Amino acid sequence: MSSALNPTNATQNKHRLYFQLSQSFNRMSKAMGQTADLMEHLQIDLHAMRNFAGGEAAKFMTVASNLNPEDDEPKHSNVTQQPSS
């Protein structure tokens, strides 16, 4: 009857392993929560980057169109003058 009151070595090992498993699940749950938070922040940052890139692209195209006007104006000749000797 004393063996029924005292847990065996196998039972102690089983309880220890279940405790380790529960601790692992707790750590995994915390890590998954942190990952979900980081993914949310990543989505916000990506949205901001898309908006910023779109605005900068529009500015770039505006400046480029001012610097390189359409074919309305005649193009300059590519002939260069020879230096006189």
Image (cartoon, rainbow, N blue to C red):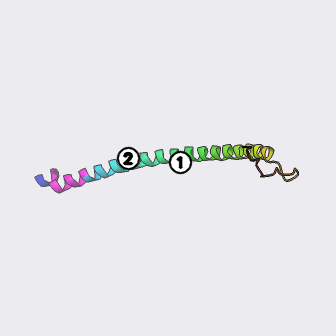
**What is the x, y in percent for residue 41?**
56, 43
Quarter of the picture containing the N terminus is: bottom left
Furthest residue in direction front, as rendered: 85
Q: Is residue 4 above or below residue 42?
A: below
Q: Residue at x 80, y 44 (%)?
A: 66
Mark 2 and mark 1: Cα distance apart in space:
18 Å
Label number found at residue 39: 1
Disc 1 crowd, CA 10 A, few/some/many (<14, 14-19, 20+): few
Furthest residue in direction left, as rendered: 2
Query: Secondary structure beneath disc 2?
Result: helix
Question: Circle 2 sits on which residue?
Answer: 27
Point out the frontmost of discs 2 and 1. Answer: 1
Task: Give the overall secondary structure of the magenta segment.
Answer: helix
**Mark 2 vs mark 1: which is more N-terminal?**
2
Magenta stretch encompasses residue 72: no
Name the kind of residue labelled 1 in the image. Answer: Met
**What is the x, y in percent for residue 33?**
47, 46
- Between 59 and 39, the one lying in front of the other is 59
Q: Residue at x 59, y 44 (%)?
A: 45
Q: Which residues are magenta?
A: 4-16
- Between 77 and 73, the one lying in front of the other is 77
Question: Quadrant of residue 8 in the image?
Answer: bottom left
| Residue 60 horizontal side relative to residue 46, left or right | right
**Looking at the image, can residue 1 be seen?**
no
Name the kind of residue labelled 2 in the image. Answer: Arg
